[in-house]
Amino acid sequence: MSNIMLYAEVTKENYLHTVVFELAYKAQELSKKLDNASVSALLICKTGLAENFKEAFINSGFDFVYIAESNRLTYYSTELYSKIAVDIIREVKPDIILVGATTQGRDLAPRISSSLHTGLTADCIGLDINEKGQLAATRPTFGGKLMATILCKTLPQMATVRPKVFKPAPENIVKDTKFIYIKPEIDNIQKKVEFIEFVKGLNTAINELDSAEIIVAGGKGMKNEAGFELLKNFAECLGGCVGASRGAVDMGLASSDIQIGQTGKTVTPKLYIACGISGAIQHIVGMQDSDKIIAINNDDKAPIFDVSDCGIVGDAFEIIPELIRIIKTLNDDTNPNISIS
Amino acid sequence: MKIIVCIKQVPDTTDIKWTENNTIQREGVESVINPYDLYAIEEALKLKKTLDDVEITVVTMGPLQAEEILRKAIAVGCDNAVLISDKKFAGADTYATGKTIASAIKSKLPDYDLILCGQFAVDGDTAQTGPSIANQLGIAQVTYVKELNKCDGKCIYAVREIEEGLETVKAEFPALICVLKGMEELTRPKINGIIKAQNTKITVYTMEDIGLTPEETGIKGSPTYVSRAFRPEHDRGKCEICTDCNVLADKIKEFGGISNE
């Protein structure tokens, strides 16, 4: 029977990464197209931690969970984790391996695929099984201007998958999950890379963007710091958060923490307002699933208009202050000042 | 200390145009050094400034025209340049590319301490070639590096920027490090650098030179292949263009952007 294996990434704070549940639900769908292939997870963590996740695995449709625990695995280490993963994969022989396209996943997966002499498709945003039963992994390519569906000639077929592209299961999928403990063979490995320290990020913008219902994002067209200040005012007036395209981040207008797009975050707010963003596909893949999209751009041929519900052609530096003025008036109309009555 | 910097020639992606057949137009598009690789070069130059006897060899795999980016790297201060070029390399995926570059390093530049790469290439955006090279060389890797510190020629401290914050690790040489874009100013070429770049002999290695067979390289040596390439489509319907800000403000309200609270 075929087997789809997911890498169960553990975060710095010892939780299972949310992408594991997104992949778990996607794997159920792929499994149906592969004569009900079994779905397994590969968990590598410090001693005792797996116990905390068992219920989550049982409720997420996993048939098997392969667990390698050791006190040497407290922090993610490319050398130790890849050695263990390769050993287990050689034993279990899954047909497909999916890994979250996080920094950890993108560090680990190419080490595994290279050791197994197999292919790896990076940062996918679409997964399917084709008529021949192969994994068809779709990703933006060539500067993001083109989508490519990639197949693999060898087994296992591996892909890293962008977080937040797929949704986790809406309700529990309870399985009689088997937990298989495997003793990691790492005693003889002298690590060349040693963990020194970890400083938790102070910037909370990442989480704010994740849950924001309204995002006002700026691109290169916002030109300078004053442009981003204007966006901040606009976002405040709408009760939203500010995001940025890679172009704006590269120009130093915004911090990479708020970058939206292929090499940044994927967001799905109710309303996304793109200001001075031309709409390179790298950006679009990070925001296209927003409920509604509005574009403000001075180039009527900018591709951002092709993915927007509505838009306006003109200078953002004139349009945004005008919008702020109108919206403030509208707000005043809908909020009659109580002290008057 | 010997440093190898792996760089890639990429099309200037800010200037991509479509042909009538919906393929990317490659002719007439300017090629540049992948922007992330510029920071890999920069880190190497910084180490050269702070330590004695640092020799930087810049390596690329690509068509013969990729020589141009190697000369640019020499012009800013790299010492030697190696071009790995063979028609049989065409169509290589990240596995085959990693194998080819690793084979070249193993056979022609085995005496290295540190390999620096850009974290991503802006055309492929896979972030896989660096780790693939490291794995095939059997050396350690550190990815998503924002800052390098305290190098003593035997090891280096690297600050990684990951989702949850900043992680510092100490890497013993030999190691491969993939760097993110930094905030620092990039070194500009000086006149004597430009002259040196024009006079530097670029060493070219072919598939046979580095001991590979046609089955191990290019499209034949690549486990993955593109089955379909298409222009992304969106099903949002036609974009309604508003003529003035009042209409747009109404739209914002309709889309839930203006609350009544």
Image (cartoon, coloured by chain):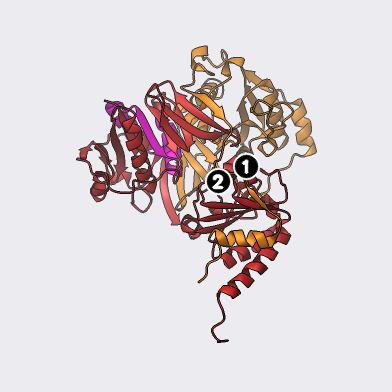
Q: How many marks?
A: 2
Question: Camera-side residue: A299 or B150?
Answer: A299
Q: Earlier in the sequence, mark 1 or mark 2?
A: 2
Nearest the camera: B2 or A245?
A245
Q: Could you tell me what secondary structure mostly forms the magenta stretch?
A: helix
Position of B214 with respect to B9 (left or right) is left
**In the drawing, does residue A79 fall left or right of residue A3?**
right
Categorize mark 1 by other alpha carbons within 10 Å: few (<14), some (14-19), many (20+).
many
What residue does disc 2 label? Answer: A261
Whether A111 is among the magenta residues is yes
- Across and down, in percent, residue B148 comes to 54, 46
In the rendered image, residue B84, in percent from the top left (x then y), is placed at 61, 21
- Which of B21/A83 is in front? B21
- The secondary structure type at the circle numbered 2 is loop
Q: Chain of mark 2?
A: A
* Magenta-highlighted residues: A85-112
Give the residue number, with chain letter if any, for mark 1. Answer: A280
Is any part of residue B5 visible from this angle?
Answer: no
Helix, strand or loop at label 1? It is: loop
Let me know if residue A102 is in the magenta part: yes
CA distance separating discs 1 and 2: 9 Å
Number of residues whose C-alpha sits closer than 10 Å to that of mark 2, classed few (under 14), some (14–19) or many (20 or more): many
